[in-house]
Image: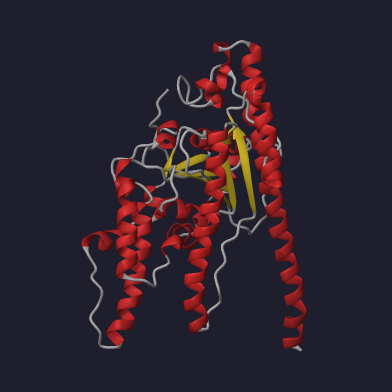
């Protein structure tokens, strides 16, 4: 199979027009953004992201996967062609900073102050559109914004930019690119695969996300690490809120608050014969933050990402029936829970939009009268 097929991106209507019943998504609402994150490596984060994207695509949703991990494993699974950092999310982050610097320099010029430096990287970034670097994959309704080793440079460059202009909201750069360029209107679901670290790329992903999924294995070390991950998330975003809102209150601006529609921890590579007791402890500790289903480690799951690029691309003839069925069930049931979250939050947003329209209608009628 050729993993580097290049074709024109397809619209959502093209993706679902062969389905008797297209998948449900409320009209007029943006894509749901799902970040898959844990700062511990080896938790099946990338494998889970890839299979969720494939599951959503099989349901007929138009999917974008964004690889923010410079190791580029998700990019490899999806057959991406990423020659340098300018084909990654890096220019989108640079563009957001460049636009902020331009706005600041306009103010400085009016005040007779010297402008902030504007180098070649920022000049080139202004020419980049997200649609220029999003590429189709061998899955007809999955597109990719890939990663490669040079993307890691962003972890060093972002704090330098922030020091140059303290008013730049570095955590909003990715979200701004997805919303201002209307990428969230081109897709139904956007999956973000983050690096195994709570760095600047991960913070951008978490700030953009509507739903946060945290994979972890049923081992004490991963349980302990994931607890620390949640602690660091809270302290990091609380610190950002406190610092940002102190300035906003002074300037009479609305305050910012980091929230997710839903957060779920997901047990992966689960061995019921050896890990049930600890998995039950983890389930009790995280409570409603845990998914109900635990991804079983089967022979087929073990090969996902090794001899095959995912269970949904595996040839069933290479496995006995029981192995194949169990492997498929592992990710089918994981997707079922995530899909329920997505549909639930879409429905809630839809009802909120209707309520807002209803409340504004009498005011408009009164103004007309």
Residue 234 x/y as whole percent: 55, 57
- The relative height of residue 259 versus residue 137 in the rendered view (above or below) is below
Q: Is residue 71 visible?
A: yes
Residue 366 x/y as whole percent: 76, 86
Rendered residue at 58%/16% (across/down)? 316
Rendered residue at 33%/52% (across/down)? 154
Q: Nearer the viewer, residue 159 or 142?
A: 159
Query: Would residue 330 appear left or right of 366 to someone viewing this image?
Result: left
Viewport quadrant of the C terminus: bottom right
Query: Would residue 271 appear left or right of 137 to someone viewing this image?
Result: right
- The relative height of residue 90 versus residue 103 in the rendered view (above or below) is above
Q: Nearer the viewer, residue 93 or 184?
A: 93
Image quadrant in which you'd find residue 285: top right
- The relative height of residue 250 versus residue 81 in the rendered view (above or below) is below
Query: Would residue 321 appear left or right of 251 to someone viewing this image?
Result: right
Rendered residue at 67%/50% (across/down)? 25
Residue 68 x/y as whole percent: 42, 46
């Amino acid at each position: 199979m050729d993993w580097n097929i290049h074709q024109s991106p397809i619209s959502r209507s093209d993706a679902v027009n062969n389905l008797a019943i297209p998948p449900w998504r409320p009209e007029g609402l943006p894509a749901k953004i799902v970040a898959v994150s844990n700062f511990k490596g080896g938790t099946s984060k990338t494998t889970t992201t890839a299979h969720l994207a494939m599951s959503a695509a099989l349901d007929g949703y138009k999917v974008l996967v964004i690889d923010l991990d410079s190791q580029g494993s998700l990019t490899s699974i999806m057959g991406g062609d990423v020659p340098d950092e300018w084909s990654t999310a890096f220019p989108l982050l640079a563009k957001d900073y460049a636009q902020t610097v331009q706005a600041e320099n306009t103010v400085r010029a009016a005040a007779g102050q010297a402008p902030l430096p504007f180098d070649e990287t920022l000049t080139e970034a202004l020419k980049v559109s997200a649609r220029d670097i999003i590429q189709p994959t061998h899955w007809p309704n999955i597109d990719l914004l890939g990663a490669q080793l040079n993307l890691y440079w962003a972890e060093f460059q972002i704090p330098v930019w922030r020091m140059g202009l303290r008013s730049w909201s570095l955590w909003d750069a990715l979200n701004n690119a997805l919303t201002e360029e209307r990428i969230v209107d081109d897709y139904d679901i956007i999956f973000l695969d983050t690096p195994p670290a709570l760095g600047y790329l991960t913070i951008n992903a978490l700030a953009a996300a509507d739903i946060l999924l945290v994979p972890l294995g049923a081992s004490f070390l991963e349980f302990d690490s994931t607890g620390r991950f949640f602690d660091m998330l809270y302290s990091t975003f609380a610190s950002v809120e406190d610092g940002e809102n102190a300035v906003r209150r002074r300037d009479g601006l609305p305050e910012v608050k980091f929230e997710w529609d839903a957060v779920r921890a997901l047990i992966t590579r689960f061995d019921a014969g050896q890990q049930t007791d600890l998995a039950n402890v983890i389930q009790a500790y995280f409570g409603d933050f845990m998914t109900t289903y635990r991804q079983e480690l089967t022979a087929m799951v073990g090969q996902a990402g090794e001899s095959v690029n995912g269970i949904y691309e595996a040839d069933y003839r290479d496995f006995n029936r029981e192995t194949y069925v169990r492997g498929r069930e592992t990710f089918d049931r994981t997707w079922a829970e995530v899909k329920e979250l997505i549909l639930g939050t879409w429905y809630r947003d839809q009802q909120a939009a209707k309520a807002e329209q209803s409340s504004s209608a009498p005011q408009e009628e009164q103004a007309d009268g």
